[in-house]
Image (spheres, rainbow, N blue to C red):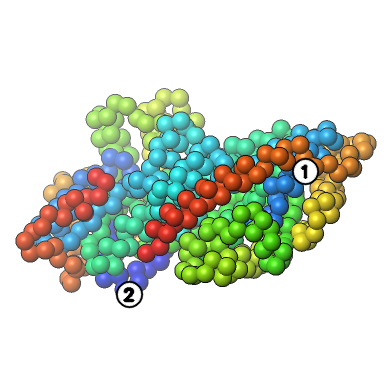
Amino acid sequence: MVPPKADYPGKLFVVEGIDGSGKSTQISLLYKWLLTQGFSTFYSEWNSSPLVKRTTRRGKNRRLLTPLTFSLIHATDFADRTERNIIPPLRAGAAVLADRYVYTAFARDVSRGCDPAWTRELYSFAVKPTVGFYFRVPLEVALERILSGRPELKYYEAGMDLGLSDDPEKSFALFQARILEQYDQVAEEFGLTIIDGTKPIAEQQRRMREIVKPHLQGLLRRPEDGGMMFSVAGGER
Amino acid sequence: MNSEFYWVPIPGVQLEEQLPGKLVVLEGTDGVGRSTQTRMLRNWLESSGLAVYDTGLTRSNLAGRHIQEAKQGHTLGRRTQSLFYATDFADRLEMEIVPALRAGYVVLTDRYIYSLIARAAVRGVERSWVRRLYGFALKPDLVLYMEVSLEKLLPRVLASGGFDYWESGMDFLHEDDMYEAFMKYQGELLHEFGLMAEEYGFVTINADRPVKDVFTDLQAQVRAVVESMVPGQEMATEFAMPLTEIEEPVEEKRSMAEMLREFFSSLMEDR
């Protein structure tokens, strides 16, 4: 990964973790906090570039994706977001938040059978985050959160393409277990900041803010009149 | 053919060590006559009783159409573009090329990873990164590089309707003069192909000559690779212009129009 260039005065904070780890809840709380603190904040979601979205959707709906093309189409999306949504606000001095980052690919693509070294090379152009949070939860906790609340699992989400099981829930559980194992390795390899995702939400958020705070000095501020940046910051949300 | 990859195997695919088909690649810059030669080779191979599967770039079921659309109506950064092409190539490799090789076809492909690598490199994407990106590509049995000199390319380009903005690299070169841009872009592409020739073991064919002479050389190379597929059988030797030749100008015009649209959208791309 590329360290942020000297002319990127902005800061990049990313959250990672398996489905049901609570990372999205935490980053949206962080997002709101940064806005109320008056910082110009951009939010970038995994798999959100409008350009590549259609191909991805087509591939998923028709189940055309293999582990290789699944990996490549997400890398394409990521490149587009890097060129469009991540680097420009970083150069402008904003806080950039990303729900999932390259580590998702390292965990998920490798779980699908992609070569770890190839996958890392694929994303070597990514900007290194200021802080990468990893929300760690035991598999059972994550599964309980997901499976109790959401009855229907999507084909690729459940890892059905890997043929682990014909039963979506079983397949999902097996797939998540693989991903979790990869995540743990990735967290160590890249020095991610581990947050215990089983702690109360407020406590996790307090910890995140504590870690983020020292990096905020000198970041771009929102206009004094409080000009609503939501539409810009929120992008495609 | 041996199922061997440049760097990493295709994930999740168990390939036999030996595939019954053969993979033959035709490479070279635009206007070098690849598509004409591909058709002639196909005719010849089929008349010798071999099943041929021919394929080209950006034709995949997954992303091909969206790449064309993306070039027309949206903007793609350079790295995004490279990755989009790689996705398309991967789809073609897995869904078309590998199955055809397994089924014992001679797969004739009009361009392979090398054109994609050259295009990306000329546009400033790191050479080593693109090479590793395509590390999942199968090593072909034969890569025929149709080499042409810039001087010989010029009259062909003029004959086919003049300079094309896209083929002149106008999307990134910032030259006022299209002639200059064309010479520069094609010159740089030729340079990139030159760098790859040894690295990837290209068989270089001098394409500055008449179609028939080029064909004779290509035929000799392909024959050496496919002969074992028709044991004890004489392969056809005659030279015949392909029957589909007439359709070519129509196709060319359409793609010219497409390329023009690509250019206009690419104008918006560079900031």
Crowding around mark 1 (Cα neighbors within 10 Å: few <14, some 14 to 19, many 20+) is: many
Q: Position of residue B21 (x, y in %)?
A: 75, 39
Residue at the image position 59 percent from the left and 46 percent from the top: B253
- SS for callout 1: helix
The residue closer to the viewer here, A201 or A81, is A81
Q: Residue at x 65, y 41 (%)?
A: B55
Against B267, residue A109 (above or below) is above
Query: Which quadrant of the figure contains the C terminus of chain B?
Result: bottom left
Is residue B130 visible to us here? no
Between A174 and B99, the residue placed more toward the observer is B99
Instruction: Look at 69% across and 61% down and name the residue there.
Output: B155
Place residue B190 in its image quadrant. Answer: bottom right
Question: Label 2 neighbourhood size at 10 Å, few (<14), some (14-19), many (20+)?
Answer: few
Label 2: chain?
A
Q: Is residue A231 left or right of residue A124?
A: left
Residue A19 in the image: x percent, y percent?
Answer: 31, 41
- Judged left or right of residue B118, residue A164 is left
Q: In which quadrant is the N terminus of chain B drawn?
A: top right
Observer-side mark, 1 or 2, equals 1
Q: Which residue is mark 2?
A: A6
Task: Give the residue pinned by disc 1.
Answer: B40
Observer-nearest of B53 and B254: B254
Identified at 67% across, 39% down, the residue is B247
Q: Can you tell which quarter of the image residue B213 is in?
A: bottom right
The CA span between labels 1 and 2 is 55 Å
Front residue of B152/A157: it is B152
Q: Is residue B214 above or below residue A139?
A: below
